[in-house]
Amino acid sequence: MKKYINIVLAALLMVACQPEHFRTVYPEGNPEIKAEVLTQDVQFGRDSISFRVTVDEKQTPLSQLQVKVMVGLRVAATEMVRTPDYHYEATLTYPVPFGPNMPEGEQVKVYLTATNVEGTATNLILTGCTGHRPAIESMYIMPPSVNYAAIGKGKQMTYDPAKEAFVAYDLKFPKSVQFLLAVVGTKFGRVDWDKPVFGMVGDNLQMIAKEQFEAEEAKAVVLEDDNLESIDTIIFNPLTFELTFGGKVAMPVTALDVQTDLAEEPAYMSKSVAKYYRGAKIFFDKDSEVEITGVVDLAKAYNLDWMEYLGGNKVKFLGNKGQYYVSYKMEEDYLVVEPLYDLTEPDVMYVCGVGLGQPSWTPQATSGWGFDSPNQNLVCRLVAPKTYQVTAYMLNGENADFDDYGSLNFKFFHQHGWGGEESGGDYKQEGLTIHGVDANGLTKKDGSTGNEKGNWIATSAPIEGIYRITLNKNTMTTSYEKIR
């Protein structure tokens, strides 16, 4: 026990004898700042402000110099500069961007704060530089690329003194449109980058450079509103950079004539198949009654998943309120209703594959995968939480590569297009004998691995008919009910 106590006492003595390590404490000090503006005039968005600054401290080492360039209440630039030792001098230059609420003749000021290592600070406000706005005597709504058809070759805006803004009325733009705002636009639909051009950097509308846009550091302005049928008004305030728009409010349809209300060769389809359809975006209200004319037999032509037939020329719409693609396949006399293609799981799912087709009375099964037409992929409606329903024509024949597999082969996707999907191996099959292929895919006769990973593939038993397919993610089952 004595030995232990002696060791402890010796250790305490050693600690007590160690020299103390503390930082050097300096006097409070007083940094002195001298500065001179070297730039008397700047054009916002084009020029920079330069100034000469000297900081001295006689008693205490310097620490840092905070620089803040202000235009009115707007911070144009800010930086923290290290200032070691007792003396610092430099010529500093900062670009002055063009932003909202920067009027002509606004003073560009530099706020300087010098601090020493003891935290003593000295402030100085540097004045004597006047800011000037770039000339904005005209404004054009210009396409982001020359092949952007939604707004053609551009539209010139008119200045409205009462609104202090550039305005464009009677536009015929879609409810979702992209564009750049340019002081000068060419007749060929190109932007003149030698004059101010406005676009988006992050969430902010500001003047941008061609190099920023080409490097995708800046993007086009995007206006969209699903509650509108189209955009007919755009207003731009060049002082505040406030951009507002309006249009014709979409009203739910109560009557639809497929021959007059649906256009030939709809633009939302691939050109290779659009010639077989008439189509348009139509605004529906949930549970609303719609009178449909122009089809041969509505009882055979209505969409089985998105409509309920009420008799005569009337159906009830079953989807949620909003815009939908309505496509009429002329040869099959069948209406296809689809949500807009940017809608994804969990709101909808898409089924795509080989051996499927729309459930018309003269159906055609697909022979290849794709998303080019409504017959290549079918939209599954959400009928309950995590439960999706689609009615499809299904045709199954022989499979030359596998003895116990047929030609019917499909998969459920989360979006319109490839990517985001369910795996058939995770689901039980009810009502038909369907293989839910796991992530390893199938093994071909020659021993190589096939590319059917995660697909739903029929057995070799023949299948033909209209089936209501239900994918239930709660129970992880796929069930099949034959309709006809």
Image (cartoon, rainbow, N blue to C red):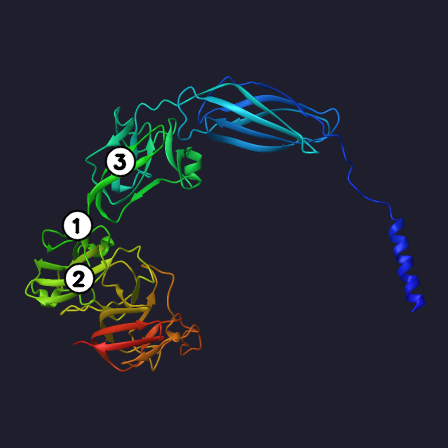
Question: Which residue is label 3 attached to?
Answer: 234
Secondary structure under tag 2 reads loop
Residue type indicated by callout 1: Met
Q: Describe the element under mark 1 as helix, strand or loop.
A: loop
The answer to whether residue 257 of the structure is visible from this angle is no
The reply to whether callout 1 and callout 3 are in contact (CB within 8 Å) is no
Kind of residue at disc 3:
Ile
Q: Residue furthest left?
A: 312
Which type of secondary structure does the marked residue at label 3 adopt?
Answer: strand
Q: Which one is nearer the viewer's eye here, 461 or 217?
A: 217
Q: Earlier in the sequence, mark 1 or mark 2?
A: 1
Q: CA distance from mark 2 to mark 3?
A: 34 Å
Would you identify the image quadrant in which residue 363 lies?
Answer: bottom left
Label 2 with label 3: CB-CB less than 8 Å: no
As measured in the structure, the alpha-carbon distance from the residue carrying label 1 to the one carrying label 3 is 21 Å
Task: Read off the residue under disc 1.
Answer: 251
Q: Nearer the viewer, mark 1 or mark 3?
A: 1
At label 3, counting other C-alpha atoms closer than 10 Å, the crowd grade (few under 14, some 14-19, many 20 or more) is some
Tell me the crowding category of disc 2: few under 14, some 14 to 19, or many 20 or more residues within 10 angstroms, Cα based: some
Q: Position of residue 214 (x, y in %)?
A: 42, 38
